[in-house]
Amino acid sequence: VDMIQFLHSIHNTMNNTIPLKEEDIQSREEEINRLSFLPEFSKLNFPPTSIESTTNNNNSNSNTATPKTWPILQCDNIFVLPGVPKFFASKMDLMVKYFLTKYTQLETRKIVLDVEERKIVHLLDAFVQRNEEVKVGAYPFVDHPEYKTIITIQGMNTEKVDNAVAELLEMMPSSYV
């Protein structure tokens, strides 16, 4: 599987925006080619303000798009940013403003138990099967003086989370809580 893709748009943009002297054409072409390869399945994010329209001097009726700023490379949920602090800061601002998805706060409830997790696994398994709309986590604490297990219940909907907590508490002996 080829893990690199060649981006003709980046190659053409760099070719058109980097001034070249005749003697530098061959070495610059090699540099531009190297910079035009990106990891396969990566994505270049162009901020809305990154393209400006310019009129071609040779033909006043022809408009071309040229970058005002370089795009931000994204591989899955990882953004690849420049190492120069000045450029890093500007890319970070653009990334936050345009490319991060809004974080949705999950409703979270915790149930603190005075019972080892292994004693309630069967209850938790049955509970999880009936409550697919919430996420359940069980965290054992060894040698803690006040509790032995903490159960977390998370979901997008407050009512569903609260109902799930009430159901789980009803399933357990009161001495466990």
Image (cartoon, rainbow, N blue to C red):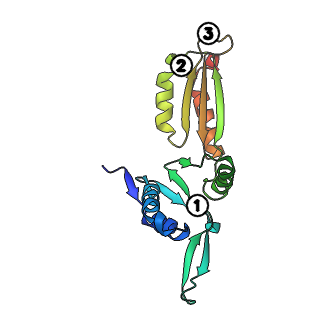
Query: Closer to the camera: disc 1 or disc 2?
Result: 1
Q: Disc 3 or 1, which lies upstream in sequence?
A: 1
Residue 40 is situated, as x and y percent measured from the top left of the image, at: 40, 53
Residue furthest to the left in view is 1
Q: Quadrant of the C terminus?
A: top right
> Helix, strand, or loop for circle 2?
helix
Residue 150 is situated, as x and y percent measured from the top left of the image, at: 61, 23
Q: Disc 2 or 3, which lies upstream in sequence?
A: 2
Q: Is the residue under label 3 in contact with that under label 2 (CB below 8 Å)?
A: no
Q: Nearer the viewer, residue 158 or 76?
A: 76
Q: Residue at label 2? A: 117
Residue at left offset 61%, top offset 16%: 148
Residue at left offset 42%, top offset 54%: 41
Residue at left offset 58%, top offset 61%: 70
Residue 134 is situated, as x and y percent measured from the top left of the image, at: 55, 40
Residue furthest to the front in view is 23
Q: Residues within 10 Å of mark 1 (few under 14, many from 20)?
A: some
Q: CA distance from mark 2 to mark 3?
A: 13 Å
> Helix, strand, or loop for circle 3?
loop
Q: Residue at label 1? A: 70
Q: Nearer the viewer, residue 5 or 172?
A: 5
Query: Closer to the camera: disc 2 or disc 3?
Result: 3
> Helix, strand, or loop for circle 1?
loop
Q: Disc 1 or 2, which lies upstream in sequence?
A: 1
Amino acid type at image mark 1 = Trp
Q: Residue at label 3? A: 143
Q: CA distance from mark 3 to mark 1?
A: 54 Å
Q: Residues within 10 Å of mark 3 (few under 14, many from 20)?
A: few
Q: CA distance from mark 1 to mark 2?
A: 52 Å
Amino acid type at image mark 2 = Glu
Picture layout, residue 163 above or below residue 126: below
Amino acid type at image mark 3 = Asp
